[in-house]
Image (cartoon, rainbow, N blue to C red):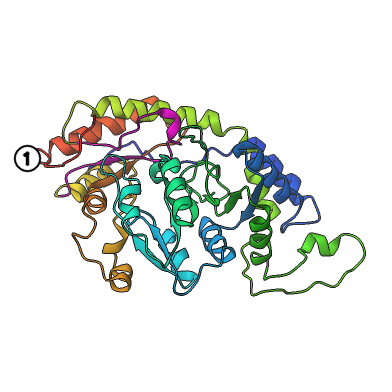
Amino acid sequence: MTNNPRKIEFFRHSLGPEEKAMVLEALDGVFLTTGEYTARFEQALASYLGVREVVALDSCTAALHLTLLALGIGPGDEVITTPLTFVATLNAIVMCGATPVLADVDPFTGNLDPRAVEKKITARTKALMPVHLYGLMCDMKAFAKLAERNGLFLVEDSAHCIEAARDGVRPGGLSTAACLSFYATKNITCGEGGAVATNDTELANKIRTLSLHGLTRNALQRHNGRYEHWDAVCLGWKYNMDNIRASLLIPQIAKMDQWKKRRSEISKKYEASFAGTDRIRFPFVQDESWSARHLFTVWVDPAIRDSFIHAMQDQGIGVVVNYRAAHLLSYYGRLLGHRRGDFPHAEHIGDSTVSLPLYPGLADDEADYVIEKALAAVNNAGEPCTNAFSNT
């Protein structure tokens, strides 16, 4: 391995004194589990997104799982989604007993293609689940029309996307619900966490009940006032978010747009630097407001993708793969019976993908170093790319 003094992490969080102070404030209170700080976070995020309800949970996977359950989706039902996503998207469908049905993606963005989805709708289809890959919003107006025309639920996997707005539509604006993530590398983070954003109060209340073992009263409600007996009205799970993690998230809401602006600056620097080479491609962002700029993912020739990753790591640069096509992973290959060639756009992107460092604390000289080493890695790889994508 090349000796190199520089170390540029794939991700560094931006938590600071305000987040630490609020956690200490929460720790000084009586309640560590779901309580006042959880409610404050839910209200603040609902206000930010412009939706009626936010239900804070312990992961985006929990949000996807409980949303589908609350909508009555189960065995015999189908949910159409993308193969180009983290396995949690598909797992949540399977955890309900339903079947994931995959449709191919747009070759220029990597997002689920509404035209491909329409061809997969059957009498068993109950919901569509678009994923805002890399933070770039899908065409939610097209998906909303498709869902309405066919009487389907529309559930957004918005793990990468809180800040974006496409055609005036934000996450949760046109869908049944949007499911969010606050995992360690997300735009706002509490280490592990998630939420459901929706304009459907009845749905939100069902999800709250499901997230706490199906109980009619949570711990704070049982603690306050005179004792009242509670009931367990359905089978539930333990998916609630506690006060400690919620307290970490509250101060970050006011910073989201500022942090997104910085990620956009870095992304534009990357795009300008890679635009002149046919060896590095990247997803097309038509309008800056459409993307939360969660990830900056490049597409390189599949023949050199792994050597590119290793070359970047040898230079001290953290990179990851977001994502390989899910139907080519062992479990989903067996479960769904798909083979290579079934979703060519998703497969080609999945075989080409490498995500570069992108976070508000990344300095300009660090971004310049990433660019320099990325260009060197592909230029030293031999023959020019045969990649079918275009940077225009």
Task: Work out whether 369 lies above or below 389.
Answer: above
- Between 118 and 233, the residue placed more toward the observer is 118
Residue stretch rendered in magenta on the structure: 280-302
- Between 387 and 300, the residue placed more toward the observer is 387
* Magenta part, dominant SS: loop
Horizontal arrangement in the rendering, residue 272 relative to residue 63 (left or right) = left
- Residue 77 in the image: x percent, y percent? 45, 69
Residue underneath mark 1: 383
Task: Work out whether 383 lies above or below 267.
Answer: below
Whether residue 296 appears in magenta in the rendering, the answer is yes
- Residue 299 in the image: x percent, y percent? 24, 42
Horizontal arrangement in the rendering, residue 40 relative to residue 373 (left or right) = right
Q: Residues within 10 Å of mark 1 (few under 14, many from 20)?
A: few
Horizontal arrangement in the rendering, residue 313 relative to residue 279 (left or right) = right
Quadrant containing the C terminus is top left
- Between 3 and 36, the residue placed more toward the observer is 36
The residue shown at (50%, 60%) is 61
- Between 200 and 351, the residue placed more toward the observer is 200
Query: Amino acid under label 1?
Result: Glu
